Image (spheres, rainbow, N blue to C red):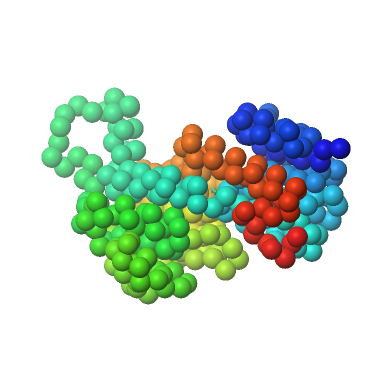
Amino acid sequence: MKKKIFVTREVFGEVLDFLAPHFEVADNQADRVLTPEELTQVLADKEGALTTLTERIDENLLSRCPQLRAVCNIAVGYNNIDLTACNKHGVMATNTPGVLDDTTADFAWALILATARRLNEAEAYIREGRWDKWKLKQFLGLDVHHATLGIVGLGRIGQVVARRATGFEMEVLYHDVQRAAPEIESACRAKYVTKDELFSRADIVTVHIPYSPQTHHAVGAAEIALMKPSAILIHAARGGVVDDAALVEALRKGTLAGAGLDVFEGEPALHPGFLEMKNVVLSPHIASSSERTRFKMAMMAAENCVAALTAGNPPNLLNPKGK
Ligand code: GLV
């Protein structure tokens, strides 16, 4: 008898086709976000799940889904999964590292350029029919070329962001909990500095660290207060890493020039202050969303699920003790 699995959100048809020979697959192609109770009920008789960041896998769910052996997240971030609870219940958890680095870094650059050059404001101005003449001082922005870029987190994605900065002839500073190896620093042309130096010197700060209790509000009022009033903050990491209320406050007071944001605390709800401000570029958590990359992420999660429930050794296992 085939093992039963559940795919919690809409995925590409090819992914379901790939899973079908291995498992009895139930899916949610209607793409409604299930409540924790609905998710628990649907997983109660399943051995595997393909999940996304909209599903919380915690003690409450796992204690009521005793058959579950593998939870395969379609995301590199996995703060929706309680790994300690997975270990306790013998559940393997996996993610999708690597395949989204370039696409996510590209999007961070889209936010950098759009925010620095006020693209959303300028476009809205045209769409509203307000463009009546060329003006010398129209939508004066911040130069990206030759500016100082401060990267918070020189992990896989941060490194790609740094390498892209070479074309803009920027000075690149970074800060991380651990200093990167010399060969990474030189490939990225990035200089390790303290957090305070990064926030006070950078013209553009871009955040690329995962969310965890340790990184909650890692960019908070104190860090934002160090930034120059002409600087901008870019955030395409995970909601909660930046203190959104502190950011709104700084933007309102004008102690920061702008922000480009793809992720939010409590998304899809967002701080209402962001909607009032023209100098904020907003996108709905789409940094990894190119056709090719989202397909690769979903397929990688499916491959993890097959490996987990057949050989017991998924390539992207997050909790080796959970087996
Ligand atoms: C998306 O946010 C991811 O973590 O992959």
x and y percent of residue 80 in the render?
A: 65, 53
Question: Which quadrant of the figure has residue 159?
Answer: bottom left
Which residue lies at the image location 32% right of the left edge and 27% below the top edge? 128
Residue lying at the far top in this picture: please name it. Answer: 129
The image quadrant where one finds the N terminus is: top right
Q: Nearer the viewer, residue 302 or 242?
A: 302
Question: Which quadrant of the figure has residue 170?
Answer: bottom left
Residue 194 higher or lower than 314, as above or below: below
Residue 304 higher or lower than 180, as above or below: above
Residue 153 visible at all: yes
Residue 55 visible at all: no
x and y percent of residue 290 in the render?
A: 46, 37
Left or right of 178? Residue 188 is: left
x and y percent of residue 284 in the render?
A: 50, 41
Q: How many marks?
A: 0
Left or right of 65? Residue 123 is: left
The image quadrant where one finds the C terminus is: bottom right
Which residue lies at the image location 84% right of the left edge and 49% below the top edge? 67
Residue lying at the far front in this picture: please name it. Answer: 311
Q: Nearer the viewer, residue 95 or 257?
A: 95
Question: Which quadrant of the figure has residue 300?
Answer: top right
